[in-house]
Amino acid sequence: MKQKHLIDLAKLSKDELMEIIELANKIMAEPDKYSEVCKGKIMATLFYEPSTRTQMSFKTAMLRLGGSVIGFDNPQNSSVSKGESLKDTITVVGGYTDIIAIRHPLEGTAKAASMYSAAPVINAGDGGHLHPTQTLTDIVTLYNEKGTLDNMCIGLCGDLKNGRTVHSLIKTMTNFKNNKFVLISTPELTIPQYIKDILNSSDCEYVFVPSLKEAIPMLDVLYMTRIQRERFASEAEYEKQKGVFVLDKEKLVSAKKDLKILHPLPRVDEIDEEVDYDPRAKYFVQTVYGMYARMALIMTMLKDVDRTPMPRQFDTSHVSCQNPNCITHREKYLPKLFRHVGGDMLICKYCDGRTLI
Ligand code: CP
């Protein structure tokens, strides 16, 4: 893998992705063969936001490879509660460990952490932005359950605005051949502009469909998502959006026989529990694929790792990111970094937020 850190899966080439998928499958076939490959290595899991699957699958992945794990799942039990900056925490933990997985409620945090870490950093979810290792989980699942990552009609349903798993999955699947996206949401929870920009610059078709029932018959994959209550500005706004899309047995009557139903989980009420017994439901087996995907990722990232931290001096812009959920507003020392995309428009390198000069 050319990249030291994993911030965005779209930065990996198709060949690099296929190598990780193939390694995950080899580990799955013969797990005992890999039970000591990370002996002596230590992973830190720094979870500033709650998690069941990502945190526990990273931990079990490292333990099953023979390595060890340190970290926190509640920053209030660390010196973060005394006001320690992200930069200082990462500098210290990067000195103790061989690899860091970080989850944080603010967008761009993993990118910011990677700028100060001697150890490779994995983005385990940064606010409503990206979740690359969920996408790795999703593509290992699809490759095994569909036999391909090309030529699929992929429906994404629910909170497409705040769903970081949706953003990462679209970014990655546009790199494969002839995939079509069906975007099923209310107008308020549609995909953000930077994901629209990626779809527009790809060869992939996409359509917006307001009804799950109408969309289902055309789909090869249905990716259901939870309405992300914690990302709403008010409870009243969340109440307006919850329960709009619910997958149940009746809706599945018109679905293809070989449809695969995925969900990053946790589920709230968007998939009726009776669907769990339908052979097309793959969301629990998906969590197991996720552990093997993370084992393959850890092994790949620890191979020939360069522990030189990135330079601490960066050119900074005088402009501030206009995304209120960007990490640069919390960690004020972070240099302001943008890509200029023409005209008056800048794109924040941490969170992909658009900012007008
Ligand atoms: N899919 C996922 O990220 O789940 P957790 O929030 O439980 O880690």
Image: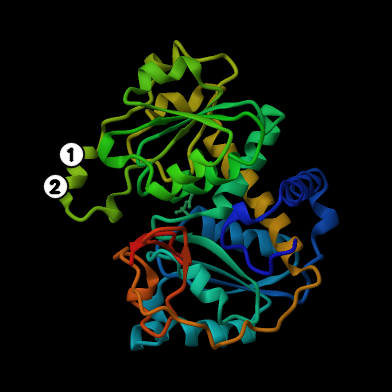
Q: Position of residue 17 (x, y in %)?
A: 71, 49
Q: Residue at x 47, y 14 (%)?
A: 217
18 and 34: which is toward the camera: 18
Dividing the picture into quarters, in which one does residue 308 lie?
bottom right
271, above or below 140, in the image: above
Residue for badge 1 = 240
Left or right of residue 356: residue 220 = right
Residue for badge 2 = 236
Question: Callout 2: helix, strand or loop?
Answer: helix
Left or right of residue 294: residue 163 = left
87, above or below 353, in the image: below
| Amino acid type at image mark 2 | Ala
Q: Tell me if residue 265 can be seen.
A: no
| Amino acid type at image mark 1 | Lys
Badge 1 vs badge 2, beta-carbon distance below 8 Å? yes
Distance (Cα) linking label 1 and label 2? 6 Å
Q: Residue at x 38, y 42 (%)?
A: 191
232 and 341: which is toward the camera: 341
| Crowd band around label 1 with a 10 angstrom C-alpha radius: few (<14), some (14–19), many (20+) | few
340 and 228: which is toward the camera: 340
